[in-house]
Image: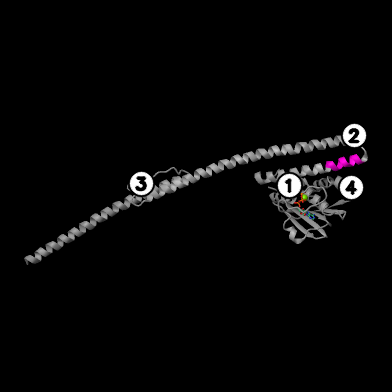
C-alpha cells in the first residue's frame, strides 16, 4: 500500500513537472513568435519606405538571430549604390540632350541662313541688279536657284525628322478648310517645275469638302507625294490628283504612270532614309515618305500605295473629315 502511494506521488510529480515545462515552453514560444512578428512588421515598414526611393536604411543587426536584418541591409545598400549610378547617368543624359538641342538649334540657323542669303543674291542677279545677264547666264542662275531650293528642302526634312522624333508632332489644326482650294493651291506651286518638263497635273473632284487638318503639315505631305510622282515619271507627261469623300473620311489619290515600284521595295519606301531616287543632281534624303506617314498617322489617317513596275503608282492619303 505504502509503495503504491509512493509511486503514485512520483508519477503525479513527473506529470506536474512535464506540464509546467510544456507551459513554460509554450509561453516562451509565444513570446518569441510575437517578437519575430514585430521584427517582420518593422522590416516591412522599412521595405515600404524603400519603395518610395529611400534606400538609406540601416536596420539594427543586434539580436538578429535569423539574419533577416543583415540580408535586408545588404540589399538596401546595393540598391542605393545602383540608384546613385542610375541618377548619375540620368543627369549626364539630360546634359547631353540639352547640348544636342542647342546644337540642332544652332545648326538650323547656320545652315538655313546662307542658303536663304544665296537665294536672295540669285534673285538680284536675275533682276539685272549687277548688270545685264545673257540668257545662258540666267539659265545657269535658275539651275543654281533650283539646287539651292533642293538643299533647303533637304535641311528642312532632316530638321523636321529630328524635331518629330525628339519632340513629337504638334498639330496646328485649322477647322473646315476647303480641300479643293487647298489642293489646287498645292498643285499650282509646281507650275515652274512641271512646265519645262512638258508635264501636266490634272485635278479631279466631285464634291467640295470642308475638313479639319494642319494645312502646313498636310501641304508637306502632298508636296512630297507630287514631287515623288514627278521624279518617277520622266517618260510620261500626266499626273492625276483625285479628291474623294466617304461618310467620315476624305481621300486624295496622287497617280502617276511612270516607273512604278516593285513589290519587294514597296515594303521599304516608308523607312527612314530609304531612297532609290537618282535623278541627276537632285538631292534626296529618303525622309519624304517617312515624314509623310508620321504626319498622316498623327491626323489619325493612313497612306496606301498601289504600284506596278513600269506602269505607275497610286499614293492614297485617307484622312478623317473632323478632328477632335
Ligand atoms: N511615285 C513614285 N514612283 C516610284 N517610286 C517612288 C514613288 N514615290 C516614292 N518612290 C520610291 O520611294 C522612295 C522613298 O521616297 P521618299 O519620298 O521617302 O524619298 P525621296 O523622294 O527619295 O527623298 P526626298 O523625299 O527626301 O526628296 C523613293 O526614293 C523612290 O524609290
Ligand atoms: Mg520624296
Res 239 label:
none
> Separation of disc 4 and disc 3 at Cα?
88 Å
Packing grade of label 1 (10 A; few <14, some 14-19, many >=20) is: many
> Separation of disc 3 and disc 2 at Cα?
91 Å
Res 61 label:
3
Res 212 label:
1
Q: Is residue 136 visible?
A: yes
Residue tagged by mark 4? 196
Of 11 and 182, nearer the camera is 11
In the drawing, does residue 272 fall left or right of residue 195? Answer: left
Res 128 label:
2
The residue mark sitting in front, 4 or 2, is 2
Q: Please report contact status of discs 3 and 2: CB closer than 8 Å, yes or no.
A: no
The residue mark sitting in front, 1 or 4, is 4
In magenta stretch: residue 297: no
In the drawing, does residue 251 fall left or right of residue 195? Answer: left
- Label 1's element? strand
Sequence order check: which comes first, mark 4 or mark 2? 2
Q: Position of residue 226 (x, y in %)?
A: 81, 50
Packing grade of label 3 (10 A; few <14, some 14-19, many >=20) is: some
Q: Is residue 52 visible?
A: no
- Label 4's element? helix
Q: Position of residue 302 (x, y in %)?
A: 72, 54
> Separation of disc 1 and disc 2 at Cα?
44 Å
Instruction: Identify the residue at the far left of this view.
Output: 2
Amino acid at each position: 500500500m505504502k509503495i503504491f502511494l509512493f509511486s503514485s506521488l512520483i508519477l503525479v510529480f513527473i506529470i506536474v513537472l512535464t506540464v509546467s515545462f510544456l507551459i513554460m515552453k509554450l509561453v516562451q514560444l509565444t513570446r518569441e513568435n510575437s517578437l519575430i512578428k514585430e521584427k517582420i512588421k518593422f522590416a516591412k515598414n522599412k521595405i515600404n519606405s524603400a519603395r518610395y526611393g529611400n534606400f538609406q536604411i540601416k536596420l539594427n543587426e543586434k539580436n538578429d538571430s535569423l539574419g533577416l536584418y543583415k540580408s535586408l541591409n545588404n540589399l538596401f545598400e546595393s540598391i542605393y549604390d545602383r540608384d546613385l549610378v542610375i541618377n548619375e547617368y540620368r543627369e549626364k543624359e539630360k546634359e547631353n540632350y540639352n547640348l544636342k538641342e542647342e546644337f540642332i538649334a544652332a545648326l538650323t540657323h547656320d545652315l538655313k541662313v546662307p542658303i536663304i542669303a544665296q537665294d536672295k543674291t540669285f534673285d538680284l542677279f536675275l533682276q539685272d541688279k549687277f548688270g545685264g545677264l545673257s540668257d545662258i547666264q540666267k539659265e545657269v542662275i535658275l539651275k543654281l536657284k533650283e539646287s539651292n531650293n533642293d538643299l533647303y528642302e533637304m535641311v528642312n526634312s532632316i530638321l523636321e525628322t529630328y524635331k518629330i522624333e525628339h519632340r513629337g508632332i504638334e498639330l496646328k489644326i485649322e477647322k473646315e478648310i476647303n480641300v479643293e482650294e487647298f489642293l489646287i493651291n498645292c498643285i499650282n506651286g509646281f507650275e515652274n517645275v512641271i512646265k519645262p518638263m512638258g508635264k501636266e497635273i490634272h485635278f479631279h473632284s466631285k464634291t467640295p469638302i470642308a475638313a479639319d487638318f494642319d494645312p502646313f503639315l498636310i501641304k508637306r505631305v502632298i508636296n512630297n507625294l507630287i514631287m515623288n510622282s514627278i521624279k518617277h515619271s520622266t517618260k510620261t507627261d500626266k499626273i492625276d490628283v483625285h479628291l474623294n469623300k466617304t461618310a467620315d473620311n476624305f481621300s486624295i489619290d496622287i497617280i502617276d504612270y511612270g516607273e512604278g515600284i516593285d513589290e519587294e521595295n514597296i515594303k521599304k519606301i516608308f523607312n527612314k532614309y530609304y531612297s532609290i531616287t537618282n535623278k541627276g543632281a537632285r538631292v534626296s534624303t529618303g525622309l519624304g515618305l517617312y515624314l509623310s506617314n508620321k504626319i498622316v498617322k498623327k491626323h489619325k489617317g493612313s497612306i496606301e500605295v498601289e504600284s506596278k513596275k513600269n506602269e505607275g503608282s497610286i499614293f492614297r492619303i485617307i484622312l478623317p473629315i473632323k478632328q477632335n
